[in-house]
Image: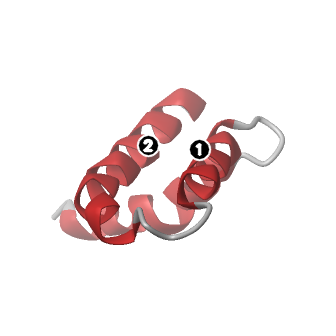
């Protein structure tokens, strides 16, 4: 379940990042922040992917399930 949450959140991140990369890639430390975000998602100590999935993705999917 943990990996499913990670891959769903990561796929959503990569999808939005594809469109926004051209607009904000010029910001200083953009790539470092992006790498830190992916590490935060993946880390078993922070469980960032589960946090984002349970707080944002699951409620959105549950509302649209009907």
Q: Of callouts 1 and 2, which one flags the residue occurring earlier in the amino acid sequence?
A: 2
Q: Is residue 37 above or below residue 55?
A: above
| Outermost residue toward the left in this view | 66
Residue 26: x and y in percent read 43, 67
Q: Which residue is mark 2?
A: 10
Rate crowding at label 2 as few (under 14), some (14 to 19) or many (20 or more) other CA atoms within 10 Å.
Answer: some
Residue 14: x and y in percent read 35, 47
The C terminus sits in image quarter: bottom left
Q: Identify which residue is drawn at 78% across, 48% down.
A: 46
The N terminus sits in image quarter: top right
Q: Is residue 22 left or right of residue 66?
A: right
Secondary structure under the numbered disc 1 in the rendered image: helix
Q: Identify which residue is drawn at 46% across, 32% down.
A: 4
Residue 39: x and y in percent read 67, 41
Secondary structure under the numbered disc 2 in the rendered image: helix
Q: Identify which residue is drawn at 23% across, 60% down.
A: 19
Camera-nearest residue between 13 and 7: 13
Q: Is residue 33 left or right of residue 1?
A: right
Q: Which residue is mark 1?
A: 38
Q: Is residue 23 left or right of residue 8?
A: left
Q: Quadrant of residue 24?
A: bottom left
Q: Is residue 21 left or right of residue 52?
A: left
Rate crowding at label 1 as few (under 14), some (14 to 19) or many (20 or more) other CA atoms within 10 Å.
Answer: some
| Outermost residue toward the right in this view | 45
Separation of residues labelled 1 and 2 (CA atoms): 8 Å
Residue 34: x and y in percent read 55, 52
Residue 13: numbered disc = none
């Amino acid at each position: 379940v943990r990996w499913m949450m990670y891959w769903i959140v990561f796929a959503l991140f990569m999808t939005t990042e594809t469109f926004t990369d051209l607009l904000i890639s010029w910001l200083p430390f953009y790539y470092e922040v992006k790498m830190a975000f992916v590490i935060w998602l993946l880390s078993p100590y922070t469980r960032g992917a589960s946090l984002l999935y349970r707080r944002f993705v699951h409620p959105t999917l549950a509302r649209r399930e009907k």
